[in-house]
Image (spheres, rainbow, N blue to C red):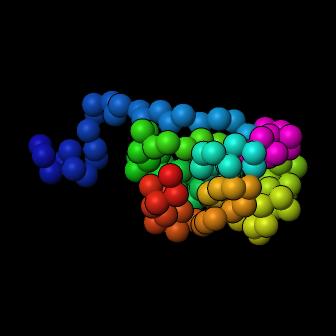
Amino acid sequence: MGFLKNIFGSSEPKEEKLLPWQALTNVSQLEEIAQSSKTKTQVVFKHSTRCGISSMVMNQFVSMYDVDANLDLYYLDLLSHRDVSNEIGYKFQVMHQSPQILIIKNGTTVAHAAHGAINEIDLSIFV
């Protein structure tokens, strides 16, 4: 039975890990993020809800994320808020990619990554 369980997975429901996401839905929030980054690291996760790679990276990020990390975590659904995504590129000087993560300190982007490289970033070094 263990063999079949490994192939098909368990029928037991997994406990879902909830992250302290803040929805990023308005361009005006970007100035708030820049100001808040002067005292606390800000992280923006740009996600495409129609992209399988983006969903896979998001799931990996959630499973690896330390919920006790002392940072603010923003989630941007870039399909619903393309204007915000575009403004992020201008304000924080990064070229648009999806999925993408930005780490912002003192008003500037100190690190960013896209696709699988997102989960290679050790957020603890930016706290």
The residue depicted at 42 percent of the width and 38 percent of the height is: 68
- Identify the residue at horizontal 15%, vertical 51% (top origin): 3
Would you say 117 lies left or right of 92 here?
A: left
x and y, in percent, of residue 94 in the image = 75, 67
In which quarter of the view is residue 52 placed? Answer: bottom right
The reply to whether residue 47 is visible in this rendering is: no
Query: Closer to the camera, 119 or 28?
Result: 28
Q: Nearer the viewer, residue 15 or 127?
A: 127
The picture quadrant where one finds residue 71 is top right
For image coordinates 41% across by 33% down, the residue present is 16
Location of the N terminus by quadrant is top left
- Which is more toward the observer, 6 or 75? 75
Residue 29 among magenta residues: yes
Q: Is 100 above or below relative to 42?
A: below
The residue that appears at 22% across and 50% down in the rendered structure is: 6
Q: Which residues are magenta?
A: 25-33
